Amino acid sequence: MRRKKSALPFWLAIFLALSILLLTNLHILVSIRVERTGVEIPAYAYRTPIIINYSYGKFPLENYTIKITLDTASLIKEGKINPSCSDIVFTNSSSWDPREWKVRYKYWVYNCNSNETEILIEIDKIPAGSTKPIYMYYGIHGVVEK
C-alpha cells in the first residue's frame, strides 16, 4: 500500500517564502523611513592631515594654539572651499563620518580667499616629546554659498 504524501512540506515552503518576502519588504520600508527622518550628516569632500611636531617638548601643552598658513585662494578658485572658508573643520579623527568625531577644535580664519590665509587652531592637549596628527576637513557636498 502506498502512503499518501503529506502536503505539509509544500505549504511550509510557501509559508517560508512569503515570510521571507514580507520581512525583506518590511526591512526596506524601515530603512527608507530611517533615511527620511534621520539627521543629515555633512559630507566633506576633502581631508588634509596636519602633523604637529612637538618631539623636542619637555612639558605637555594644554589648550595650545597653533598657526597654519594655507592658500585658500587656490582652493576657492578650484571650488574646494566656499568663499568665506566656513566649510572648514578641524578634528583629531581620520574618520570621514562626523558622528565619530569626539573632538572638534576651535579655530579662527584670518584673510580668507588669500594665498596666505592664517588659521589659528586651539589644540586641547599635545603630549611632551610627541607628534600629534589632526585633520582638516573641507568642501561640504551640496552646500553652495553665494
Image: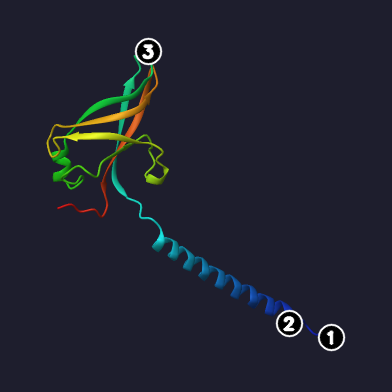
Q: Are marks 2 and 3 in contact (CB under 8 Å)?
A: no
Residue at mark 2: 7
Say which residue appears at 27% left-offset and 52% top-offset.
Answer: 141
Say which residue appears at 28% left-offset and 26% top-offset.
Answer: 65
Task: Point out which mark residue 2 bears.
Answer: 1
Quadrant assignment, res 88: top left
Q: In this rendering, is residue 95 above or below 62?
A: below
Whole-percent x, y for residue 111 in the image: 13, 35
Question: Seen from this angle, which residue lies furthest right?
Answer: 1
Q: Is residue 96 visible?
A: yes
Within-10-Å neighbours for mark 1: few <14, some 14–19, many 20+: few
Residue at mark 3: 58
Task: Point out which mark residue 120 bears.
Answer: none
- In space, the residues marked 1 and 2 are separated at their CA atoms by 15 Å
Q: Disc 2 residue type?
A: Ala
Identify the image quadrant of the N terminus: bottom right
Q: Nearer the viewer, mark 3 or mark 1?
A: 3
Q: Disc 1 residue type?
A: Arg
Where disc 1 sits, the SS reads loop
Q: Are marks 3 and 1 in contact (CB under 8 Å)?
A: no
Within-10-Å neighbours for mark 3: few <14, some 14–19, many 20+: few
First in residue order: circle 2 vs circle 3 = 2
Q: Nearer the viewer, mark 2 or mark 3?
A: 3
Report the front residue among 1 and 61: 61
Quadrant assignment, res 33: bottom left
